[in-house]
Image (cartoon, rainbow, N blue to C red):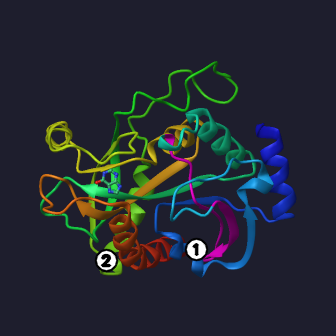
C-alpha cells in the first residue's frame, strides 16, 4: 500500500518536493487558501479511503506557503469513522518517503480550562493517549523505526520555541497545554471531563495523536496547535454540537492562518 501511495503522490506532484506537512483540523480549511501555485490531489487519486466527516474535504494541496514548500492534508481520518489506526501509519510513512521532515498538526478541541475560552489557540506541548489505540500496533520493521519509540519529546522543542516566538512577535495569544485524545464520536460526560482535568489535560479532542505518534516514529518533527471551539461540558451551559465546533473553528482559523504563515516565513 505504502509504495502505491508514494508513487501516486509523486506522480501527482510531478517533481514538486514539499518538506512541511500541514494537517488541517475540522473547519480549518481556510489555512490552505493562502497556498500559492496549488496542486490539488483528491485522496481517492492516491488510494486513500473516502472521508465521512462534515467539514473535512479529502484532498492533498501542495504549493508554497510563507516561502516554504508545503503539503496540506485538507481532511483527515478519524478513528471514530472506523478507520484503522494503521492507515494513519501508512499515510505518514508515505509522506516521510516523499521528503516531509516537519509536521504542523492542527485540530479543533474542547477546553478543560475556564481561562481558555472558545476561539483560543493552544500550542500542544504534550498529549495523553487515552484511546487504547495506537497506529504502531502490529509487526515492527526495525528499518523504519524502533519497536518502542520514545515519546518524551513528541512535540519538538525547537519548533515549539519558534511557534512561541512567532506568536509573541505578531501579538497572537497562544495558550500552551496538554491535549487529551479520546476516540469519540460522543462528546465527553461531565465525569469524564473532571477525570481528564485531574489527569493533567488542558484540552480534549478526537484526532491528531495517531498522526503525531506515527510522525515521531518515522523521525519527523512535530508542532501541534489546537483551535479551541468550545468549553467542556461542565463549564459550558449549552449542549455541544459539531456545528458549533465548525463555526468556532472557522472564526479562530483566521488567527491560526496568520500564525502558521508567519511561522513558515521564519
Ligand atoms: N470534545 C472532544 N472533541 C472535540 C471537542 C470536545 O469538546 N470540541 C472539538 N472537538
Where is residue 51? Give x, y as percent: 61, 53
Residue density around tag 2, few if under 14, some if 14–19, many if 20 or more, within 10 Å = some
The residue sitting at 76% across, 62% down in the picture is 17
The residue sitting at 66% across, 53% down in the picture is 100
Identify the residue position indicated by label 2 in the image.
172
Where is residue 24? Give x, y as percent: 52, 62
Relative to 234, 254 lies left or right: right
Relative to 80, 76 lies left or right: right
In this view, the mark in front (2 or 1): 1
User: Which of these two is toward me, 10 or 148?
Assistant: 10
User: Which of these two is toward me, 171 or 39?
Assistant: 39
Identify the residue position indicated by label 1 in the image.
32
Relative to 19, 201 lies left or right: left
Question: For residue 169, which numbered disc appears in the image?
Answer: none
Where is residue 125? Give x, y as percent: 33, 50
Q: Is residue 128 magenta?
A: no
Distance from the alpha carbon under mark 2 to that under mark 1: 19 Å
Per the image, label 1 sits on a secondary structure element best described as: helix
Q: Give, as a single range, the part of the protein colored magenta.
A: 58-79
The residue sitting at 58% across, 24% down in the picture is 146
Quadrant in which the N terminus appears: top right
Amino acid at each position: 500500500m505504502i509504495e502505491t501511495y508514494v508513487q501516486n503522490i509523486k506522480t501527482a506532484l510531478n517533481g514538486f518536493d514539499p518538506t512541511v506537512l500541514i494537517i488541517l483540523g475540522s473547519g480549518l480549511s481556510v489555512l490552505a487558501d493562502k497556498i500559492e501555485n496549488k496542486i490539488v490531489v483528491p485522496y481517492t487519486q492516491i488510494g486513500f479511503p473516502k472521508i465521512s466527516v462534515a467539514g473535512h474535504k479529502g484532498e492533498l494541496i501542495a504549493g508554497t506557503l510563507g516561502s516554504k514548500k508545503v503539503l496540506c492534508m485538507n481532511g483527515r481520518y478519524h478513528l471514530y469513522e472506523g478507520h484503522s489506526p494503521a492507515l494513519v501509519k501508512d499515510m505518514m510513512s508515505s509522506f516521510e518517503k516523499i521528503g516531509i521532515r516537519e509536521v504542523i498538526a492542527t485540530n479543533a478541541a474542547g477546553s478543560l480550562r475556564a481561562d481558555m475560552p472558545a476561539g483560543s489557540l493552544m500550542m500542544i506541548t504534550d498529549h495523553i493517549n487515552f484511546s487504547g489505540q495506537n497506529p504502531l500496533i502490529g509487526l515492527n520493521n526495525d528499518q523504519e523505526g524502533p519497536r518502542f519509540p520514545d515519546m518524551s519529546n513528541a512535540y519538538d522543542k525547537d519548533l515549539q520555541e519558534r511557534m512561541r516566538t512567532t506568536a509573541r512577535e505578531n501579538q497572537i495569544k497562544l495558550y500552551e497545554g496538554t491535549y487529551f485524545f479520546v476516540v469519540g464520536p460522543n462528546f465527553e460526560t461531565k465525569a469524564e471531563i473532571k477525570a481528564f482535568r485531574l489527569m493533567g489535560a488542558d484540552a480534549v479532542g478526537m484526532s491528531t495523536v495517531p498522526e503525531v505518534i506515527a510522525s515521531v516514529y518515522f523521525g519527523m518533527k512535530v508542532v501541534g496547535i489546537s483551535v479551541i471551539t468550545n468549553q467542556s461540558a461542565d463549564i459550558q451551559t449549552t449542549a455541544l454540537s459539531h456545528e458549533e465546533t465548525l463555526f468556532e473553528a472557522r472564526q479562530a482559523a483566521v488567527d491560526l492562518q496568520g500564525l502558521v504563515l508567519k511561522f513558515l516565513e521564519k
